[in-house]
Amino acid sequence: MVSSDVGMMGGAEAHEYQYLTAVGEDHVVVCKSCGYNANIDAAKHKLSSVSEPTSQRVEEVYTPGCKDNKNDHHLKNVDPRSFTGTCVDDLSLPTEQSLCVVCDSPLSQSRGIEVGNIFKLGEKYSRLMGATYLDNRGTENFLVMGCYGIGIGRTIACIVEQHSDERGIIWPKGIAPYAIHILALGNKTEVTELAESLYADLQKAGLEVLYDDREQTPGVKFGDADLLGMPIQVVVSKRSIDAGGVEVRLRKESNSKVVPYGAVLEALKAHINVGD
Ligand SMILES: [Zn+2]
């Protein structure tokens, strides 16, 4: 969670939930020493030590057509720290040389994707709308307001970014569209019958099941199952039946195990109940 600009919502302060990733669109400033962090748009920072003052004398240079308090002249070797004045706004963005405003440690920068945000609106809108409540002493007070938003699509994109390999998505069990993906390989009657009854039994047991009964080659079905990334694949094939049951394979692992049909429901439930 990083500090952010309140933007058009206004209010006292705002934070964003940033998922740090090299492909992120936002830049986030982080202090690894004290934990200060902020979106670069809202980040406060200190400049690191300025270079040594120039020892050269200030000189007047002839610059035709330009003006620096004197027509056709500019000054050279000016030390900016000799200027006096009042800074009225935060004008600079942090750089790799910037220091933390809290603890003076070097700041580092990361890229991130904003997946959510939260705004402390305070009484900004309740005062405008006259939204009040009576407290237990009968005094009228303005409602204190806040609001938040979560980007569902962005969150899913970040999860896929983090949970995938070269073959496709590996859904964490908690948010997988389906826990189980049944693949029926080949068109032998015994395979189709076993796959159909497995599909029915698992649904009856309340499990979320995707059933691939397309007439496609095993290669296509395995490729699609890996791409879609359901956590558990159950393969029904002539080979698995000859070996005594169905083949259970976890998407995040490469090995598989043949489980007798009578034990498959309990085995799948056990996999689902184990954390990711
Ligand atoms: Zn710090």
Image: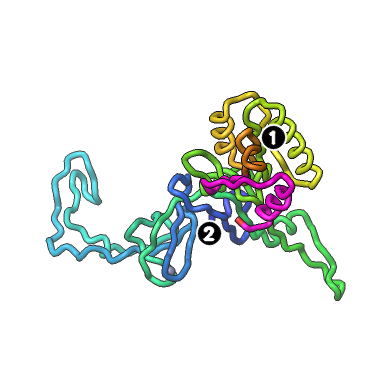
Label 2: element kind: strand
Q: Which mark is residue 211?
A: 1
Q: Position of residue 94 (x, y in %)?
A: 39, 57
Seen in the picture, residue 150 relative to 14 is either above or below; the reply is above
Task: Using the rendered view, name the quadrant where residue 140 is placed.
Answer: bottom right
> Where is mark 2, residue-wise?
2
Residue drawn at the location 59% of the way across and 58% of the way down: 14
Q: Position of residue 243 (x, y in %)?
A: 62, 41
Q: Is mark 1 within 8 Å of ligand 1?
A: no
Q: Position of residue 228 (x, y in %)?
A: 59, 37
Q: Which residues are magenta?
A: 248-275
The answer to whether 135 appears left or right of 195 in the picture is: right
State how far apart marks 1 and 2 are (Cα). Answer: 42 Å
Q: Nearer the viewer, residue 103 or 44?
A: 103
Coloring scheme of the render? rainbow
**Figure label count:** 2
